[in-house]
Amino acid sequence: MRNIALKAGSRPPWVGLAAAVWVEIAAGNAYNFPLYSPALKSVLGYNQQQLTILGVANDIGESVGLLPGIACNKFPPWAVLLVGVVLCFLGYGVIWLTVSQTITGLPYWVLWIALVVATNSNAWFGTAVLVTNMRNFPLSRGTVSGILKGYAGIAAAIYTVLYNMVLQNSATTLLLFLALGIPLICLVTTYFIRACTPASGEDSSEHGHFVFTQAASVFLAIYVVAISITSDYVSLSDALSYILVAIMVVFMLSPLAIPVKMTLFPATKKRIRSAGSSDSLAQEGGDSTQTDPLLTPSSSAAYLGSFYETEDFSDVEILLAIGEGAVKEKRRPRRGEDFKLGEAFVKADFWLLWFVYFLGVGAGVTVLNNLAQIGVALGVNDTTELLCLFSLCNFAGRLGSGVLSEHYVRSKAIPRTVWITCTHIMMILTFLLYASALSGTLYAATVLLGVCCGVIYSLMVPTASELFGLKHFGLIYNFILLGNPIGAFLFSGLLAGKLYDAEATKQGSSTCIGAECFRLTFLVLAGVCGLGTILSIILTIRIRPVYQMLYAGGSFRVPQASDR
């Protein structure tokens, strides 16, 4: 792979993180489906099941990222981003031509493929910035994941503000913005997002920089929700709306304050080196030009001996076998080392993590895809408030879970899956709350579901990297993401869509009204999350020793990997 000629801890990683924030917001464009799906239904005359299947296409495109996962190990980030730019332009361009009736008579399957192509841009955008920044900040994986995925979570609220205050509630104009505006934004950021040599130890100022970025994202989220709600109840002039949106853009630019501050007020770096932790990420006092230092394992052998004593063969037996020529020195990786996708396939922990994610996110995305119809069924005609509320809470779950899990994994070596288990339990209660259809429960349930979806998505990212390494993380991460569209197809397309249409048929209309439209769906999803709880508990028990080894000294340790 390429040599990276950047000094450890230099300014470029923070510039790249600030640019990645914009890319992640752009990569949240799939959340716009509830905003323009009513236009698809009315203009094209689709029923609810057809619309739900389009929602599945939305999820398939967003989550099928095996190609970007492979590409991020072979090409620079700008090339991966460029593919996303082209896909976004082509996909949303076709949808805009259809909804604006510039082109008529396109078959249903063409629109379905166009939506897959459009949202698949998110996989290229998200993979490029997530993999690059987690490699640039390997000692703060949970924090970086929480920040980036938090901004992606608040994207729905940002788009809602643009939709209401700038685009005049026009689905056609929104689709035109997605086809032209999003590609342009990502094209500009390609210059700034690049791989950098990670810091050689824990920087005393790094924590403060992360806190600032997290605080900026929180203020952005609060501000966006506040102006979104205000615009629903107060008539704002066009000039005032544009000013409020301009302030929102300033909040979005705030992470750039870190590299600006580092430029204007350079400080001598004080590294806090933890004994034995990530020692070989970069060599102090040595040559600042290194070749993929993150992918070069550190010497943590002292901590691995006792942990791996329970493996099938002892080290002595393996050495004897090697000497006799019975086996080759090359061995399969152990949890915490760098896995290839094929090597991860044979690990029970990989499939437990996959199913835990699939059951949780699949259930959550079912509600998100049908949020507009759920709102109408329960008497809420303006569902933009629900989407904005879901987005805010989704952001809170993503950002908060990153901070919380990072604290406890460092202080007590508690696996991040503990919080995923708690989230599945909360989702059971949430779906029962939806099913009850009591007065006021729709908003409360949407708040809880938004938090839960954010937690599961955000914590899957660092968990996968800690168990299976960063070398092939892009591919492994995107394979786990396949749980999203599969869950959407099973729970949203086959379950929710059919039950909704069946109830609507009983009422003699294409629009279903009342609690019965989704009640059975919610009860099934509660059972799905019950299964997710059981699997998550099993996974937590299995990987607890891995986390005790990785975070034995309160800081992440890169295990010794075999030469493969």
Image: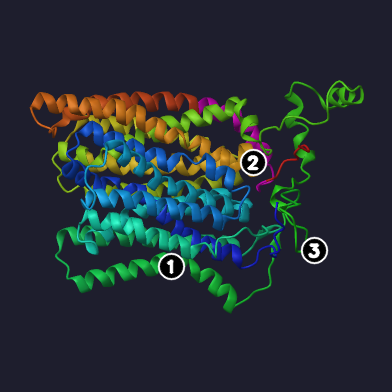
Secondary element at tag 1: helix
Task: Say which label, 1 or 3, has the lower sequence index.
Answer: 1
**Disc 2 target residue:** 469
Q: In this view, does 325 lie to the left or right of 103?
A: right
> In this figure, what is the number of numbered marks?
3
C-alpha span from label 2 to label 3: 25 Å
Q: In this view, does 126 lie to the left or right of 222?
A: right
Q: Quick check: can you spot residue 388?
A: no
Q: Where is residue 224 in the image (x, y as percent from the top left)?
A: 31, 60
Q: Which residues are the magenta region?
A: 537-556
**Disc 3 target residue:** 287
Res 113 label: none
Q: Where is residue 332 in the image (x, y as percent from the top left)?
A: 72, 30
Q: Quick check: can you spot residue 102?
A: yes
Task: Say which label, 1 or 2, has the lower sequence index.
Answer: 1
C-alpha span from label 1 to label 3: 34 Å
Observer-nearest residue: 327 or 557? 327
Residue drawn at x 11%, y 23% as measured from the top left: 506
C-alpha span from label 1 to label 2: 31 Å
Q: Is residue 329 left or right of residue 390?
A: right
Secondary element at tag 2: loop
Residue drawn at x 32%, y 49% as measured from the top left: 94
Residue drawn at x 69%, y 64% as measured from the top left: 6
Q: For the residue marked with disc 2, what is the amino acid?
A: Gly
Per the picture, the main secondary structure of the magenta-coloured stretch is helix
Queried whether the magenta region covers residue 547, the answer comes back as yes
Q: For the residue marked with disc 1, what is the amino acid?
A: Leu
Q: Which residue lies furthest to the right in this view?
A: 323
**Disc 1 target residue:** 253
Queried whether the magenta region covers residue 48, the answer comes back as no
